[in-house]
Image: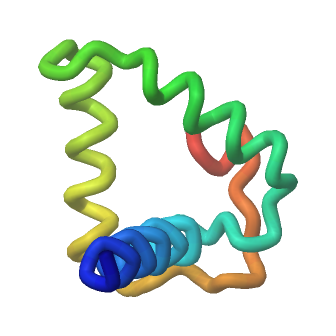
Amino acid sequence: MMADRKKEAREKFQLGGLVFKAGLTKTDRAFLLGGLIELAGVVPGSPEHRRLRDIGEEAFRAPSSDSSSSHTAEQLE
């Protein structure tokens, strides 16, 4: 039971790190959740999935974004 809780806490910490890495820590939470819900509908292996995965792979190779910045639609395009 304790191992499950530690694993769950680690997953949450890692997911929070992704929000930080993307520079979205100051973003409206409803907007962020809406975006994640939309992403959940992207079919694995589809061209859109591959495109977004490529962006993510590149971001992992880059230094972390400034946590005070927030992405807008213009920045993401």
Q: Residue at x 80, y 60 (%)?
A: 27
- Quarter occupied by residue 6: bottom left
Give the percent coordinates (x, y) of residue 59.
33, 65
Q: Identify the colour scheme used.
A: rainbow
Q: Residue at x 56, y 37 (%)?
A: 36
Locate residue 39 relative to residue 61 in the image: left or right.
Answer: right
Locate residue 22 relative to residue 73 in the image: left or right.
Answer: left
Give the percent coordinates (x, y) of residue 52.
32, 37
Q: Residue at x 56, y 76 (%)?
A: 20
Q: Residue at x 61, y 70 (%)?
A: 23
Give the percent coordinates (x, y) of residue 29.
81, 53
Locate residue 24 relative to residue 65 in the image: left or right.
Answer: right
Q: Quadrant of the C terminus?
A: top right
Q: Nearer the viewer, residue 56 or 11?
A: 11
Q: Nearer the viewer, residue 73 or 19?
A: 19
Q: Quadrant of the N terminus?
A: bottom left
- Quarter occupied by residue 37: top right
With respect to residue 28, does 70 lie above or below? below
Q: Is residue 62 visible?
A: no
Q: How many numbered discs sit on the rendered protein? A: 0
